[in-house]
Image (spheres, coloured by chain):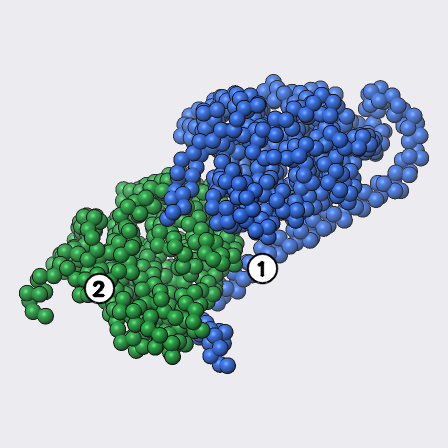
Amino acid sequence: MQNAWLIPLLPLLSFILLLLFGKKLKEASAYAGIGATLLSLMLAAAVMLGQWGGESYKAEGVWLSIGKHAVTMGYEINPLNALMLVIVTLVSFLVHVYSKSYMRGDDRFHVFFAYLGLFTFAMLGLVLSPNLLQVYMFWELVGLGSFLLIGYYYFKPEAKAAAKKAFIMTRIGDVGLFIGIILLYWQAGSFEYDEIFKAIADGTISSDMITLIAILIFVGAVGKSGQLPLHTWLPDAMEGPTPVSALIHAATMVAAGVYLVAAMYPLFEASSAAMTTVAVVGGITAIFAASIGLMQKDIKRVLAYSTVSQLGYMMLALGSGGYTAGVFHLMTHAFFKALLFLAAGSVIHAVHTQNIEEMGGLWRKLKITAPLFLIGALSISGFPLFSGFFSKDEILMATYGDGRYGLFVLAVLAAFFTAFYMFRLFFMVFAGSPSQEHGKVGESDGPMILPMAVLGVLAVLAGYLNTPWFGTFLADYLSHGPVRFAAEGEHGPIWIPILATAVSLAGILLAYLMYGKKKLSRNWLSRSLPSLSTIVYRKYYVDEAYDATVVRGTTGFSCLWSYVDRYLVEGAVNGTVSLIQWLGKRGSYMYDGQVQRIGAVAVAGLVIILLFFAAAGGYFS
Amino acid sequence: MDLQTLTSMNWGIMAPEFVVLGTALLLSLLDLFMTGKKSRRPLGILAIAGIAASFIFLYLQFGDPGASLFHDMYRLDSFSKAFKLILLLGTGLILVLAYDYQMKEEEEYRGEFYYLLLTALLGAMVMASSADMITLFIGLELLSLSSYVMAGLRKGKMESNEAAFKYVVTGGISTAVTLFGMSYIFGMTGETNLYAVGAALRDTSILQNQFLLVFAFFITFAGLTFKIASAPFHMWAPDVYQGSPLPVTAFLSVVSKTAGFALILRFFLLCFSSAPGIKGDQLLLQVQPYLAVLAGATMIAGNVIALRQRDIKRLFAYSSVAQAGYILVPFVSVSALLFETTWFYLLAYLFMNIGAFAVIQAVTAAAGTNDISGFEGLYKRSPWLAVAMTIFILSLAGIPLTAGFAGKFGIFMNALGTNPPHYILAGILMATTVVSYFYYFNIIGQMFFRTGQEGPRIQHKNGLLVVTAVCAAATLFFGIFPGAALHFFYNEFQFNDFFQVMEQK
């Protein structure tokens, strides 16, 4: 526990090492990164075991004193961040191993691993921070790491644009976060979590102020976690290498917003308006992004929208008072989404395209990747007994229990969409016959398979950490933390899991009928699900009926949201950008260097100020 | 005053100034007697030695109790020491940088540059130490007049002439405005000493001229914004920065600006700290919204127009306008942390901006153009310069673990720590910072994300290397351990003598 500070430093060491000697190490660079993250993972696992029933730990020193105000820096271990440490180091380690093979032959191989090290350092630093200022500093560094990695293929103009967009869009959210943090400092007298919580509990901060600060902090989370309306950078971020998408834009960095809300939970809980904001933004994002995911053609963009949607789920859970549910889904999502991305990377590696319409029939060719992808897809769809099933159930129960029935309906609908688009993806990629020849399609090698296999196991097993049947280990574990929360979930109505299962099955079935039915793969699916054969027999009517209602409906719905996304949300963002650029253009015309104008502007400015003051001060009256 | 009283005075408190003055005189004489074709570079080393000596004298004064000459006309207090430290550091770095600057056909004016830089520094030091309108004005003009000549040092170049001309004309307007405002203050109080003015303005009889007093405040302030290049007197900056020789641009953007801030803080806080505004409120609180508008306009104008710039020197001119807007925020919000934040930000700004200008000097010299495309693929041609520039830009943009972030953090603490907090100002600061990422990151993009024409590797000159290394190290150090600088500040400069009238010793 005292050595926890080593956890982020090891990847930093790898970063510095690779920066200095990377060129000489070449392909051996990977080992530096892998070794560092493996050690971090082992330390993190030890820390988490120590936390199981143990005490929180905190070490810090004064970093800066301004006048009478002292700002400290240090690290803290509590159940929530110990869990995050394990998730981050584990996924980072697996992604390092995977990348060794995936990035082979790239002439900036060492740079890639150096960036990965920098990112991992920043993310772990963020998680370990005991105070908000430190969180903010690492928050920015994480953004910088993401910027570098998205722009890794800098010779592609889209990648460059996406990197810039991601950095600047998330920074818009940070405006709110930073102001919120400093306001909170002046209100609570500290950046430290525990002192802030104490101030809130003592009621020294007015409730309006709490609401304002909570919403400002949430704005930062919205930017980082790709919530509406600051989500547009996340799908574009898929221009980065696929392992990066798995690590940063699925499992860790984008979850930082959710983590921040969870870490600041007492602040949010103290304001019902803030909780409602979080829940509503999360719920709308969940359905919004899921519906856009229905029509995407790029395998990574589907997954990206799905990430946005799942993050919305987590926010919804937190906003509805489902603290455990939110954190639980964060964990399960980290595993199955990382798995999906790595599997997608394996597919892209094999066929050299990201367009799912050009894929097909890969089930036989990618004998290991395909079942692993299926596990991920089943898990995210909430198929019974897979991890996503349990965590999604808890979210639904929390939302229902909170009495937000409108959001509950949205969440159920989003679950249906999720199952549908994931299996649309699955069938289009793996079932049927190849729509194009891709030359020799070969399965990936060991270093790529192994991480996927580990994640595949976790994508199934992680769910059993918190189930109504075997025990609520996770909830018990988290309840030792600084955040007090009510026990939740177990006493929800029994029909919710049944409804969730039905909805998930319906989505899968619809996808099967639309994308899988005519294809060769029908055999294996009907064998595994014998009851389906009768329905398949009547496929004609069903198909027609679906086509007339559901399919048209969802297509229309999805198109509508895509337009909203493209023209309203992006439009507003682009509009702001154009406005600023227009101002810049006008402004630089004004600055044409005429000396008369320089003088005139100065004197006019002065006169305007004087006139305003005279008028406001009542000189004329 | 007879000779005896003159010699009995404690002239030692002006030792750093005398050293600078002596060096400047020595250099001008040497320059005069050197033959035409002889290289003037050794003079540069002499100038650096002069600055170093002055720095040592200043350092020796650190422990001294406050003292003054001519009844607080010239003061040795922690305020003057703190700011003179920045001024000397900045000028020293710029001299090292200038040593490597290629003057080409104007090489023969190099000597002139050295001693003009020193007289300009002398003016700046007077501005930091005076507490009397007359000496302050002399310092201001000494700095300005030296700068006007320096801007036009490249006599063969049209743009340099243009810069000097515009600088003189706008400088003249600003001087006129400043003097006009000061004359009102003198007229109402009959005093030129700032402490006496402050005391006179405390008198309730001033209330019958309350509007006049506020007008005098605004007029003087507007005139002085010329030196710090903030609204409404900021439009000269792009043209002058672009046309001046690069070390002069660096001087204007760092040293001259720091001196301007020192003057503004000293002048307005001493004169108006307890002056009544209209309707009984404090004057300094009453003018806040108006100053906030000016600071906000400065940030917006600087950052937004910088977006359109292709010329790297113009871009940095707008960036430095924007930075002036940031540094004004603590002054506008008049919080308890005003001095340390302003001082720290100016210190951070010194390192990041001079460092950036050092890289710009190397890159523009190699590319032969001031266009931003000169930075294309810099990482390939000179990894060291590219990495150093990245550090400076990240710091200017206020990314954590750089001195710029620590500085901006302090500014935020100021803006939101007052009662009531300045939400709008803080919001504008943050939003314009985001806007600034567009152009700052564009430079980073040019350096790393662009292969560019495979130019030859850039030869590093020693002076340049020293400046970039010192600046980069300091930017990182003060970013990771800002406490070190502030600790030093609290130890050495108490600042409780700022408002104290000192008897001559």
Residue B246 vs residue B111: left or right? right
Picture coordinates of residue A598, whole percent (x, y): 41, 70
Picture coordinates of residue B78, whole percent (x, y): 26, 54
* Residue A92 sits above or below residue A289 on the image: above
* Image quadrant assignment for residue B254: bottom left
Residue named by callout 2: B72
In the rendered structure, which amino acid carries the disc numbered 1?
A: Leu
In the rendered structure, which amino acid carries the disc numbered 2?
A: Asp
Q: Which of labels 2 and 1 is toward the front? A: 2
**Which residue of the protein is positioned furthest toward the left in this rendering?**
B4
Pointer 1 local density, CA inside 10 Å: few below 14, some 14–19, many at least 20: few
* Image quadrant assignment for residue B298: bottom left
Q: Residue at x 42, y 39 (%)?
A: A72
Q: Residue at x 26, y 48 (%)?
A: B492
What separation in Å lies between label 2 and label 1 (alpha carbons)?
Answer: 51 Å
Q: Nearer the viewer, residue A286 or B12?
A: B12
Q: Which image quadrant: the C terminus of chain B?
A: bottom left
Q: Which image quadrant: the N terminus of chain B?
A: bottom left
* Image quadrant assignment for residue A378: top right
**Which residue of the protein is positioned furthest toward the bottom in this rendering?**
A621
Q: Nearer the viewer, residue A609 or B172?
A: A609
Colour of the chain lettered B: green
Residue A530 vs residue B144: left or right? right
Specify whether residue B430 is in view.
yes
Q: Residue at x 21, y 65 (%)?
A: B73
**Chain letter, colour blue:** A
Residue named by callout 1: A579
Residue A573 vs residue B296: left or right? right
